[in-house]
Image: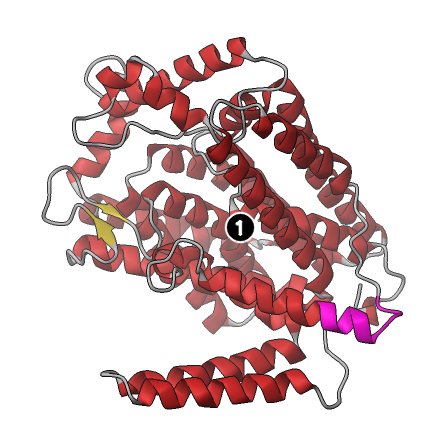
Amino acid sequence: MNDTNNSKGFNPVYVIAAAVTIGLSLFLLTTHKPILAVAPGLGLVFFFLVSRNLELGYMAIIFSLPFAAYRNIGGLEYLRLHWILAFCIVFFLAIRLLTDKQEKLGLSSKLWIWLMPYLALSLVVSMYSAYPKAAMKTVILQAVAYLFIGLGMILVTRKGFKRILPNVIIASISTGSFLAALGFFFNISWFAEKVGGGGFKRGLGATTDPNSLSLMILFVMPFLARMLVKNKRTSIRLLALLLICVNLLGLVTTYSRGGMLLLVLLSTGIAFTYASLLSARYLGLILALAGFLVVGAISVIPSSYWERQASLVSFGQKDRSLKRRASYLIVGWERFLASPVFGSGPGVFKKYYAANPIADKMVRSGHDRERPAHNTYLEVLVGGGLMSLSLFLGALIQGLRNYNRAIRNFIANKNNDMAMITKTYRLSYLVLLFFLLLFSDLFQKYLLVTLAMSQVALNLSLENHEGVK
């Protein structure tokens, strides 16, 4: 693993950046919003900090993930805050490689054995797709996703893996859950959808989709559970309890039925993972807390939430959403049979669904006919056939193997703290894999993060000395 700090010394890039910043600030002073003149200066400060510590920039990207609704600059699709941050990181990393010939990236991983053929196959299939533009866009985004995985492998240090990244995940997702609760219960349209409109409200937080927020909340729960049972300070444990309640409330506002089902499964995984750390005293406290949450849920959660959860057992009667999900499976199966080996082109499921007569019955008038499959594995199967699905699943299994091997190594070295935090990452990774059965996202950011962290964990477990990184 490499030191992420750049070597000291004069760098002409700073002079150029300063000149551009001054010029831009002077220009903004002449506009009708002169207050914007402070923005370039603040940007330069952050630019400088990132140049000195690239891991800081990576953590800033992770922090921004729950704020998808506000990451685009000026509403432009390809001008996104996290992409700009990633560009800065790659830029300074390239400078570091050019100035230090002995720099080692630490990109070696068995994940690439699966991921690179998957990318190559996607590129080839996209050329023969009936929707080449949509397919090629997906391939480009896939390449960018691999860059993000690589940055995680290169930049995250031992301290980052063990302390900084978990805290960043907790802080950012919990903020999103808090905003979702505000939006839902106080009718703030910035943070909830259909406020004052037709249909039932759903919490969004600062993201763009309630199901995406639900996924994030499930992802953060293992980290909060570890924070609760591992930390010995009462104030930190109380904070963990508060954040757990905030995130559970955020989950409720999403009205996600799959999220609630997976929460039950995740709770079992959390119990098995952390049971050994709980004394009888704290076990009783947690059971008391669970009872308090149940009573609070009954009194605070609206009846419409329970009605939506109950709709899971009324399939085929009146729930249009469940029928629509079934229609995705029907269209997906048809497309798979049409091209079972190599698929129809990455990211094109929604095009075929829109063109299928079944969309006439399932898509409400005035709504977009292009619908995702609500199942990432089905998206991969339709897009790249059995070949792509095999490679995709191979990469996911390799990530799990990395975590398992790292945990065994840490335990063998009697490094229980690192073994436990690695188990936490693994549990969050597993709940993501289950949620992707219910949600379409070929480039789910937290999946990319946890794939990268599986290799970071393995690398750290193979180091001979605790203080190396």
Q: On the rendered structure, is 58 left or right of 326? A: right
Image location (x, y in percent) of residue 342: 62, 19
98 in the magenta segment: yes
Q: On the rendered structure, is 48 left or right of 359? A: right
Residue displayed at 48% across by 22% down:
130
Residue displayed at 29% across by 88% down:
30
95 in the magenta segment: yes
Q: Quadrant of residue 54?
A: bottom right
Examine the rendered structure and indicate whether residue 256 appears above or below residue 170. Answer: above
Other residues around mark 1 within 10 Å, as few (<14) / some (14–19) / many (≥20) = many
Image location (x, y in percent) of residue 247: 37, 54
Q: On the rendered structure, is 238 left or right of 322? A: right
Instruction: Name the one closer to the observer, 417 or 390.
Output: 390
Name the amino acid, label 1. Answer: Pro
Image location (x, y in percent) of residue 238: 43, 66
Residue displayed at 17% across by 45% down:
194
Residue underneath mark 1? 222
Residue displayed at 70% across by 60% down:
417
Instruction: Name the one closer to the observer, 118 or 318.
Output: 118
Q: Main secondary structure of the magenta part?
A: helix
Image location (x, y in percent) of residue 368: 26, 32
The part of the chain drawn in magenta is: 94-103
| Secondary structure category for the residue under label 1 | helix
